[in-house]
């Protein structure tokens, strides 16, 4: 089962945000952020795959639209 591109874009955006925060935290502690950079690379890969899976991409406007779509699906399921 392949997830919807909107779900992939939303989840990968959140993973990338947390990975950047983790990388900054590890770097400020003096460590090399190996795991955070791996998570960031995975997030970018899933984001690109999700974006290319869209039938008619409209540019960067797709990111907030994806979050709104996922939120509406969650609210409809309640």
Image: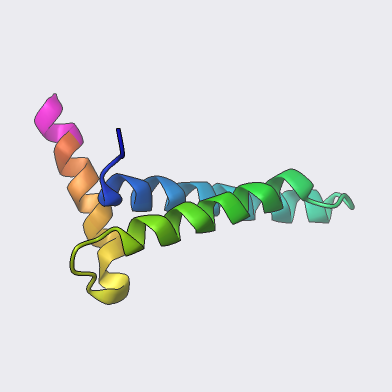
In terms of image quadrants, where is residue 27? Answer: bottom right
- Above or below for 59 versus 27: below
**In the rendered view of the protein, which quadrant contains the N terminus?**
top left
Q: Residue at x 32, y 72 (%)?
A: 60
Q: Residue at x 72, y 56 (%)?
A: 24
- For the point 81% across and 55% down, the residue is 28
For the C terminus, the image quarter is: top left
Any magenta on residue 43? no
Figure disc tally: 0
Residue farthest along the right direction in this orientation: 30
51 on left or right of 25? left
Judge left or right: residue 44 versus residue 62.
Answer: right
| Chain part drawn in magenta | 74-78
Question: What secondary structure is the magenta-colored segment mainly?
Answer: helix
Q: Which colouring convention does the figure follow?
A: rainbow
Query: Measuring 56% from the left and 47% from the top, which residue is drawn there?
Result: 18
Q: Position of residue 68 (x, y in %)?
A: 20, 51
**Observer-nearest of 58 and 32:** 58
**Most extreme residue toward the front, as rendered?**
1
76 magenta-colored? yes
| Residue positioned most to the bottom | 59
Q: What is the residue that sits farthest to the left in this orientation?
A: 76
29 relative position to 3: left or right: right
């Amino acid at each position: 089962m392949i997830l919807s591109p909107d779900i992939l874009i939303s989840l990968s955006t959140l993973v990338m945000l947390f990975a950047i925060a983790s990388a900054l935290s590890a770097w400020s502690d003096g460590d090399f952020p190996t795991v955070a950079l791996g998570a960031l690379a995975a997030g970018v890969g899933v984001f690109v795959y999700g974006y290319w899976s869209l039938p008619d991409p409209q540019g960067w406007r797709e990111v907030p639209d994806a979050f709104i779509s996922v939120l509406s699906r969650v609210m409809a399921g309640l």
